[in-house]
Amino acid sequence: NNSNLYFIYLPTYWRYDKNFDNSSYNQIKQIVNNLSIPFIDIHEKVLLKETDKLIFFPFRVHGHYTIEGYKKVSENIYNYILNDIK
């Protein structure tokens, strides 16, 4: 049906609050890349650019992203797909 599949990595609160084990993240990223599926890494594209990553989580606790966090995530996904189509 002429559609594209994208893998979007949305990091959780725990990645930034505690000592995070990158092994599963690295394995998933490698598998997705080996399958030639575009990997949209919100960790790299959005959160790494921020000094205080916990501002993307309401009240600085685990759960959903804040409104601003979702806005930045959606803008990044939109721009990635828009540039991928061109």
Image (spheres, helix red, strand yellow):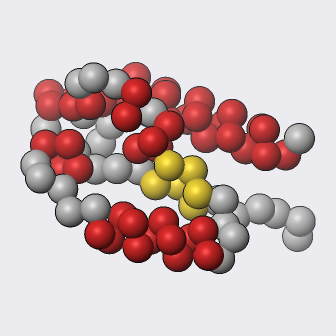
Q: Is residue 36 placed above or below 66 in the rendered structure? A: below
Residue at 34 percent across and 25 percent down: it is 50
Instruction: Specify whether residue 67 is in view.
Output: no
Q: Is residue 70 left or right of residue 4?
A: left
Q: Report the number of numbered marks.
A: 0
Q: Is residue 78 left or right of residue 32?
A: right
Q: Nearer the viewer, residue 41 or 4?
A: 41
Instruction: Specify whether residue 4 is in view.
Output: yes
Q: On the image, which quarter does residue 63 sit in?
A: top left
Residue at 77 percent across and 38 percent down: it is 82
Counting from the top left corner in percent of width and height, residue 75 is at 59, 30
Q: Is residue 56 left or right of residue 46?
A: left
Q: Is residue 64 placed above or below 29 in the rendered structure? A: above
Q: On the image, which quarter does residue 26 sit in?
A: bottom left
Q: Is residue 61 left or right of residue 51?
A: left
Residue at 53 percent across and 55 percent down: it is 8
Quarter in which the C terminus is drawn: top right
Q: Is residue 85 placed above or below 52 in the rendered structure? A: below
Counting from the top left corner in percent of width and height, residue 41 is at 50, 49
Counting from the top left corner in percent of width and height, residue 39 is at 59, 57
Quarter in which the N terminus is drawn: bottom right
Counting from the top left corner in percent of width and height, residue 69 is at 39, 29
Residue at 40 percent across and 23 percent down: it is 68
